[in-house]
């Protein structure tokens, strides 16, 4: 992988994880409509985006090792928030898929941070590339759900 791809891959990975990550089981909070569900997710994602942007840019593997854990903390908090919002029945399958993708993304972020801290640039780059691939699907699901603040790009 070319070094010039590192910043763009890290950016894509961060975009996926800023959207929040599924974690805890869903509560009985049940939005009445897709629009209500989308609003709840958009609020969660907007909050996470603000917090992550305040940390500064992640443009290298070194940045990933130092800033990544803070991003992971933010996405872990958002994980519970997104997972706690019960989707309406007509979009439940897409919502479940979205939460699953976000869980996978958060696990890969943690692994990439560990690799960056260990100085394993090759492994960190591969995990970031994997995150970028997940981002494409997460963005599609977020847009389908109407959660445009959760979609990257």
Image (cartoon, helix red, strand yellow):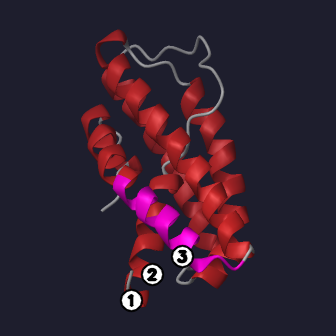
Q: Which residue is mark 1?
A: 4
Where 44 falls versus 46 (above or below)? above
Mark 1 Cα-neighbour bin, 10 Å: few <14, some 14–19, many ≥20: few
The segment highlighted magenta reads 119-133
Identified at 30% across, 52% down, the residue is: 136
In this view, the mark in front (3 or 2): 3
Query: Magenta stretch: residue 61 in it?
Result: no
- Residue 57 - label: none
Q: Earlier in the sequence, mark 1 or mark 3?
A: 1
Report which quarter residue 26 is drawn in: top right
- Residue 122 - label: 3
Q: How many marks?
A: 3
Q: Position of residue 76 (x, y in %)?
A: 67, 45
Residue 56 seen = no
Mark 1–mark 2 Cα distance, whole angstroms, equals: 7 Å
Q: Earlier in the sequence, mark 3 or mark 2?
A: 2
Report which quarter residue 83 is drawn in: top right
Mark 3–mark 2 Cα distance, whole angstroms, equals: 14 Å
Q: Position of residue 66 (x, y in %)?
A: 73, 76
Where disc 2 sits, the SS reads helix
Q: Position of residue 133 (x, y in %)?
A: 35, 56
Identified at 69% across, 80% down, the residue is: 119
In this view, the mark in front (1 or 3): 3
Query: Magenta stretch: residue 120 in it?
Result: yes
Q: Which residue is mark 2?
A: 7
Direction from residue 143 to residue 17 in the image, left or right: right
The one nearer the camera, 139 or 62, is 62
Main secondary structure type of the part rendered in magenta: helix
């Amino acid at each position: 992988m070319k070094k010039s791809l590192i910043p763009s891959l890290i950016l894509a990975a961060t975009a996926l994880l800023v959207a929040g990550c599924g974690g805890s089981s869903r509560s009985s909070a049940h939005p009445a409509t897709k629009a209500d569900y989308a609003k709840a997710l958009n609020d969660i994602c907007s909050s996470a985006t603000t917090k992550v942007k305040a940390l500064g840019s992640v443009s290298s593997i070194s940045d990933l090792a130092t800033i990544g854990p803070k991003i992971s903390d933010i996405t872990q908090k958002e994980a519970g928030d997104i997972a706690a919002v019960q989707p309406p029945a007509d979009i439940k399958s897409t919502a479940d898929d979205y939460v699953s993708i976000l869980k996978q993304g958060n696990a890969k972020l943690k692994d990439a941070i560990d690799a960056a801290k260990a100085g394993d640039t090759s492994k960190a780059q591969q995990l970031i590339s994997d995150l970028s691939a997940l981002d494409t699907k997460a963005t599609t699901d977020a847009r389908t759900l109407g959660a445009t603040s959760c979609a990257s790009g």
